[in-house]
Amino acid sequence: DTAWLKECDLLIAECTCPSIGVGYELAYAEKLNKPCYVFYRRSEIHLSAMITGDPYYNVIPYETKEELFEKISVILSD
């Protein structure tokens, strides 16, 4: 996974279900200065202050798959 992070242009993470692995990937991507977009279902979870309090991460709530895909489409079209 670290090789993929070194090669990628940006990281999109779905963080509704907490994961140490995804947290590590986010920190590693930040270290590499990769743009990071963190998605989560607002009605299901409150994200960690480690993520929401770090201005490096673009934290984006969503509720439906359609809303999620629409927001990802906007990111990828830039």
Image (spheres, helix red, strand yellow):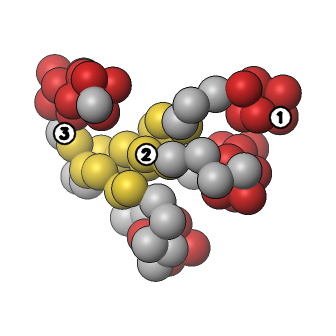
- Residue 76 visible somewhere in the drawing: yes
Question: Residue at 19% across / 39% down in the picture?
Answer: 63
Horizontal and vertical percent position of residue 11: 54, 37
Residue toward you, 37 or 46? 37
**Image quarter in which the C terminus is found:** top left
Mark 1, Cα crowd under 10 Å, few <14 / some 14-19 / many 20+, is few
Farthest front residue in view: 78
* Sequence-wise first label, 1 or 3: 1
Q: Mark 3 — residue?
A: 63
Question: Residue at 83% across / 34% down in the picture?
Answer: 2
Question: Residue at 43% across / 45% down in the picture?
Answer: 37
Q: CA distance from mark 1 to mark 2?
A: 17 Å
Horizontal and vertical percent position of residue 44: 32, 50
Q: Secondary structure at mark 1?
A: helix
Mark 3, Cα crowd under 10 Å, few <14 / some 14-19 / many 20+, is few
Q: Mark 1 — residue?
A: 2
Q: Mark 2 — residue?
A: 37
Q: CA distance from mark 1 to mark 3?
A: 30 Å
Horizontal and vertical percent position of residue 61: 26, 50
| Left or right, 65 with reference to 17 | left
Q: Secondary structure at mark 3?
A: loop
Give yes or no for contact between labels 1 and 2 (Cβ–Cβ under 8 Å).
no
Residue type at mark 3: give it: Glu
* Sequence-wise first label, 1 or 2: 1
Residue type at mark 2: give it: Tyr
* Sequence-wise first label, 3 or 2: 2
